[in-house]
Each structure stands twice: as structure tokens, then as C-alpha cells.
């Protein structure tokens, strides 16, 4: 899941809340699957279940688009696909550059989902001179010395950073200076950007840590249900502080 921060207001020019904007791709993915199966209409309950949200929230989100569905019939699938695609700006071509063509950058370059959703990989950029000219996903890698020219020649406004953490901020600064106003950041670091530049961060390690937390909690609940308390809990007074009730805390 992508997380990020923005320096723009909490609502878009048409008054659509950012939380709603974040859910629109989920609806579009579910609707696209329905469209591929030639399903003509869908109820709010069915679509909400497919998108992983509740139906009341879905209806509220769609009201911002001016789409209210038909009682007893539901929503027209093809029209909603068009409506959401238009709202997300997916009815036009978006040239994208990927900076950092290591394992992750190469995997992103080979991802076929970009083109089908309106994103064209215009260039692949890497700082390693040995990578220059090598084709990845059929696109020759170009050196970072050409970054500004590449941005200008291709009219790029969206950049993807897949560099090591230490290189991410300098790359970000150059992208922004060259005219990029939206950045998808895969580097494990927080980027500082000026107002008017949107950053979305994807950190797989953070997502795994969150999953680890839930797994640990589930294991604890199962152990408690089985009557097998953790060793520390069974130790009793061994974990108590000098007053008997409050565990002792080491000074920071």
C-alpha cells in the first residue's frame, strides 16, 4: 500500500476529499474486473465488497462524482469506469521516468500495468555509467547527467525514485528543479519537497513490519485462549518494580 504526504489542500479543485481520491483506484480496479467479465451493472454492496470498503462510504464517494446509480439497478459499470478514469486523469497519456535501475527499478520498468492505466515509461535513468545504453524492458537506460534534458524533452511531470536512500533526496531535488511535480518514492527515506509537489511513498519493509505486528498480536491472542501465557507474564514478581505493582523502567 502507498502512503504519502502532500503540500496541497485537503480537497481537489472539484471539492473531492483526498480520502475519496485515495479510494477511487480501488473502485476502478474492481470495476475494470467487472467490465472484463462483461458485467453491465453492479450494486453498491457488490462493488463495495469487491473494493474492500463499506457501501455507505462508496455511495458517499460516488456522490462527489455526481454518480448516484439507479434504485433497483445499481451503477452502470462502463460509465463508472469512464467517470473515475476521467477524474483520475487516466484518459490522457502520462509520461513517467524511473530513476535508479537496480533490481527494483528494473522490475518497475517491466511492469505491464503502467501502460494499461495511462502511464508510459518515457525513460529509465541510472547513475552507473556501465548501465548507459543497456536495454531494460526494451528501453535503453540513460545516464543521470541527461536527467534534466530527458524531463524537458518528454514533458515529464511524474517521476519514480528507486535509488538507494542516500541518493534519493539529490535525485528528488533535480527532478523538481527540472519540472517534475509528482514523485513516487520507493527509497527508504523521507523526501523534502516544496509546496506544489506531491510525494507518495511506498515502503515494503514498513508494510511487512505492520503485518508482523498483527501476526504477533494474533499469536498472543491464540496463546491466551489456550491458557498459555507468555513466559514474561508467568514470571510474576520477577517483572515487578520495587513497589511490587509497577514494572521498573530503566532511565533513557
Image: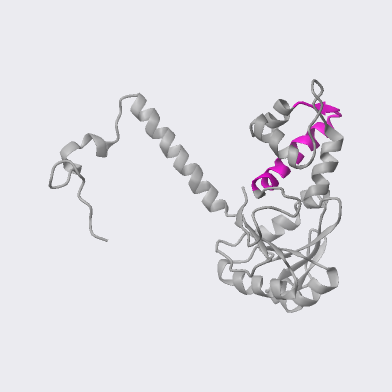
Q: Residue at x 70, y 47 (%)?
A: 21
Q: Residue at x 13, y 45 (%)?
A: 243
* Closer to the camera in the image, 71 or 39: 71
Residue found at the far top of this picture? 72
Question: Which residues fall within the magenta stretch?
Answer: 19-43
Indicate the quadrant containing the C terminus: top left, top right, bottom left or bottom right.
bottom left
* Closer to the camera in the image, 197 or 68: 68
* Closer to the camera in the image, 77 or 186: 77
* Closer to the camera in the image, 221 or 182: 182
Q: Is residue 67 left or right of residue 206?
A: right
For residue 45, say whether it is visible: yes
On whether residue 133 falls in the magenta region, the answer is: no
Q: 249 above or below 214?
A: below
Q: Quadrant of residue 238 in the image? A: top left
On whether residue 30 falls in the magenta region, the answer is: yes
Q: Quadrant of residue 173 in the image? A: bottom right
Q: Quadrant of residue 63 in the image? A: top right
Q: 93 above or below 170?
A: above
x and y, in percent, of residue 147 in the image: 75, 74
x and y, in percent, of residue 27 in the image: 73, 38
x and y, in percent, of residue 232 in the image: 25, 39
x and y, in percent, of residue 26 in the image: 70, 40
Q: Residue at x 36, y 25 (%)?
A: 225
Q: Residue at x 39, y 30 (%)?
A: 221
Main SS category, magenta section: helix
Amino acid at each position: 500500500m502507498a502512503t504519502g504526504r502532500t503540500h496541497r489542500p485537503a480537497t481537489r479543485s472539484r471539492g473531492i476529499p483526498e480520502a475519496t481520491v485515495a479510494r477511487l483506484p480501488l473502485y476502478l480496479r474492481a470495476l475494470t474486473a467487472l467490465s472484463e467479465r462483461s458485467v453491465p451493472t453492479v450494486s453498491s454492496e457488490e462493488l463495495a465488497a469487491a473494493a474492500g470498503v463499506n457501501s455507505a462510504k462508496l455511495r458517499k464517494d460516488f456522490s462527489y462524482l455526481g454518480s448516484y446509480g439507479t434504485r433497483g439497478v445499481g451503477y452502470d459499470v462502463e460509465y463508472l469506469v469512464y467517470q473515475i478514469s476521467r477524474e483520475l486523469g487516466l484518459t490522457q497519456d502520462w509520461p513517467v521516468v524511473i530513476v535508479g535501475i537496480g533490481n527494483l527499478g528494473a522490475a518497475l520498468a517491466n511492469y505491464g500495468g503502467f501502460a494499461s492505466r495511462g502511464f508510459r515509461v518515457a525513460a529509465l535513468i541510472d547513475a552507473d555509467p556501465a548501465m548507459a545504453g543497456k536495454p531494460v524492458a526494451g528501453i535503453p537506460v540513460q545516464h543521470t547527467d541527461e536527467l534534466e534534458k530527458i524531463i524537458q524533452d518528454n514533458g515529464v511531470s511524474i517521476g519514480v525514485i528507486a535509488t538507494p536512500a542516500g541518493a534519493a533526496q539529490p535525485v528528488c531535488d533535480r527532478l523538481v528543479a527540472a519540472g517534475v511535480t509528482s514523485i513516487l518514492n520507493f527509497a527508504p527515506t523521507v523526501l523534502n519537497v516544496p509546496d506544489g509537489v506531491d510525494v507518495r511513498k511506498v515502503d515494503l519493509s514498513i508494510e511487512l513490519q505492520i503485518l508482523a505486528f498483527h501476526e504477533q498480536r494474533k499469536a498472543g491472542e491464540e496463546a491466551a485462549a489456550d491458557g498459555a501465557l507468555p513466559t514474561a507474564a508467568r514470571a510474576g514478581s520477577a517483572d515487578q518494580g520495587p513497589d511490587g505493582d509497577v514494572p521498573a523502567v530503566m532511565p533513557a
